[in-house]
């Protein structure tokens, strides 16, 4: 099953998202071009020509600013001199076309190959995180254990902490129910193996649901006497949630669409992987 490791080449670098905005933008533009050539991105018809060149690049950077800085669409539209309706329309359209999902899957496989692993993992770690949400959010619930009114983010990550599947539910939904769509997405993607979780994922109903999808759900204790104890690779999902906490748009949820919230989570990991791969290439060239 292996252990969660980080390649030595990427460990000394400090985390500075602003230093690598251009890397993220370049990856998005490259993926948009690939989608256009493959026919996955149809040309939009209308009285005005679609954004291109510097305007398109500025729009991608504006979407990055909304996600990272937690800015409102109207505010970022005023700052970059692009109508906020145009920016939001681009983000919604790209989300609907599956741009972020395609990018995350491609970068995840590239990163695993760079680390000397197979493109697809043999095991995943599952967990959830409760986030506060605004009244305008698409759905809300109260997590009685954490006393938070909001939503739950359910993920399944590989040993490097990169998600293979993401889903969102009201905070009052139990983990054994909220993780089922994630397991279903894993099975649809061709994954068949163990899914490691904490003791909250015990139960005959979840075990049977996993077996029907070809996934064995294994509940492993991660704590003792009220203290967290790392168990195998299970701790990596906690690190993934710590990465998400760096992005303001993902601390208090304002999204009115479940799909848009999942898109922002995918963008977070796309930014992380883009930065890592760029640093890896730069260090290989300087070696």
Image (cartoon, rainbow, N blue to C red):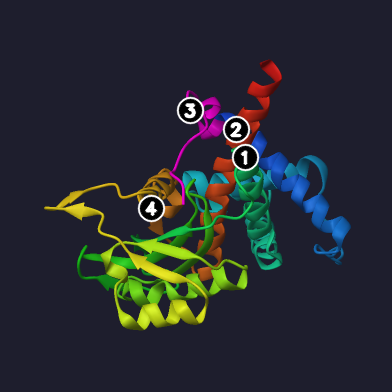
What is the x, y in percent for residue 219?
32, 65
Gap in angstroms between the C-alphas marked 2 and 1: 8 Å
Whether residue 48 appears in magenta in the rendering, the answer is no
- Pick whichever, 43 or 102, lies toward us: 102
Gap in angstroms between the C-alphas marked 4 and 2: 22 Å
Whether residue 6 appears in magenta in the rendering, the answer is yes
Q: Earlier in the sequence, mark 4 or mark 3?
A: 3
Q: Are marks 2 and 1 in contact (CB under 8 Å)?
A: yes
Q: Quadrant of residue 90?
A: bottom right
Q: Which residue is mark 4?
A: 251
Q: Are marks 1 and 3 in contact (CB under 8 Å)?
A: no
Q: Residue at x 63, y 22 (%)?
A: 283
Q: Earlier in the sequence, mark 3 or mark 2?
A: 3
Which mark is on residue 11? 3
Gap in angstroms between the C-alphas marked 1 and 4: 22 Å
Give SS at disc 2.
helix
Can residue 67 be seen in this snapshot? yes
Gap in angstroms between the C-alphas marked 4 and 3: 26 Å
Which of pointers 3 and 2 indicates the residue nearer the eye? Answer: 3
The residue positioned farthest toward the top in the image shown: 287
Q: Residue at x 49, y 49 (%)?
A: 71
């Amino acid at each position: 099953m292996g252990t969660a490791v980080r390649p030595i080449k990427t460990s000394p670098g400090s985390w500075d998202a602003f230093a690598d905005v251009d890397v993220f933008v370049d990856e998005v533009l490259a993926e948009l071009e690939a989608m256009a050539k493959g026919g996955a991105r149809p040309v939009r018809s209308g009285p005005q020509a679609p954004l291109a060149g510097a305007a398109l690049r500025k729009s991608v950077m504006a979407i990055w600013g909304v996600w990272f800085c937690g800015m409102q669409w109207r505010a970022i539209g005023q700052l970059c001199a692009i109508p906020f309706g145009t920016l939001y329309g681009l983000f919604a359209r790209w989300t609907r076309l599956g741009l972020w999902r395609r990018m995350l899957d491609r970068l995840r496989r590239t990163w695993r190959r760079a680390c000397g692993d197979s493109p697809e993992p043999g095991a995943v770690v599952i967990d959830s995180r409760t986030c506060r949400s605004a009244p305008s959010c698409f759905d809300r619930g109260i997590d009685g254990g954490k006393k938070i009114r909001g939503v739950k983010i359910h993920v399944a990550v590989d040993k490097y902490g990169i998600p293979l599947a993401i889903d969102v539910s009201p905070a009052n939904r139990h983990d054994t129910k909220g993780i089922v769509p994630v397991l279903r997405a894993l099975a649809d993607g061709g994954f068949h193996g163990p899914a490691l979780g904490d003791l909250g994922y015990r139960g005959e109903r979840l075990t049977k649901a996993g077996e029907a999808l070809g996934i064995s759900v294994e509940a492993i204790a991660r704590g003792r006497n009220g203290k967290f104890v790392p168990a195998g690779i299970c701790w990596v999902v906690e690190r993934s949630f710590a990465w998400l906490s760096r992005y303001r748009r993902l601390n208090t949820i304002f999204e009115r669409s479940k799909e848009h919230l999942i898109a922002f989570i995918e963008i977070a990991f796309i930014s992380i992987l883009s930065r890592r791969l760029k640093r890896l290439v730069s260090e290989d060239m300087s070696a």
